[in-house]
Amino acid sequence: MNKSELIDAVAASADISKAEAGKALDAWIEGITGALKQGDDVVLVGFGSFSVKDRAERTGRNPQSGKAIKIAAAKVPGFKAGSGLEAAVN
């Protein structure tokens, strides 16, 4: 499912226009992104939690030359599914 298909599903489920569903989805994404930028976790009980994780510096390999390269440390977003989502999928 891509973003436009998700907007269509939200619009049909909530009985709102596609434009309103698109605005709601964009606001939801912006809210989660803003919270993660500030270092906060976002927990949606039954669905899952979004958090920022620190990835340590590591050594990798250039696949073309085989030379070792240094991959810088980074902060990466993470998601852990909640029990309700896991139960729905299984």
Image (cartoon, helix red, strand yellow):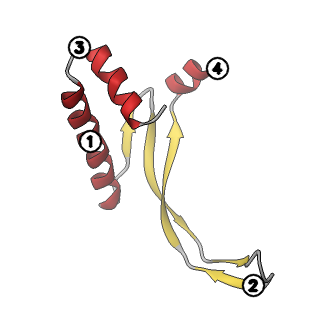
Mark with earlier residue (2, 3):
3
* Tag shown at residue 90: 4
Residue depth check, mark 2 versus mark 3: number of the one nearer the observer: 3
Mark with earlier residue (3, 4):
3
Residue depth check, mark 1 versus mark 4: number of the one nearer the observer: 1
In percent of width and height, residue 45 lies at: 40, 29
Mark with earlier residue (1, 2):
1
Q: What residue sits right under mark 3 in the picture?
A: 15
Q: What residue sits right under mark 1 in the picture?
A: 26
* CA distance for labels 4 and 2: 41 Å
Identified at 27% across, 48% down, the residue is: 30
Could you tell me the amino acid type at mark 4?
Asn
Asked whether the residues under the numbered discs 1 and 3 touch, taking CB atoms below 8 Å apart as contact, a structural biologist would say: no
In percent of width and height, residue 12 lies at: 30, 15
Q: What residue sits right under mark 2 in the picture?
A: 68
Could you tell me the amino acid type at mark 1?
Asp
Mark with earlier residue (4, 2):
2
Asked whether the residues under the numbered discs 2 and 3 touch, taking CB atoms below 8 Å apart as contact, a structural biologist would say: no
Could you tell me the amino acid type at mark 3?
Asp
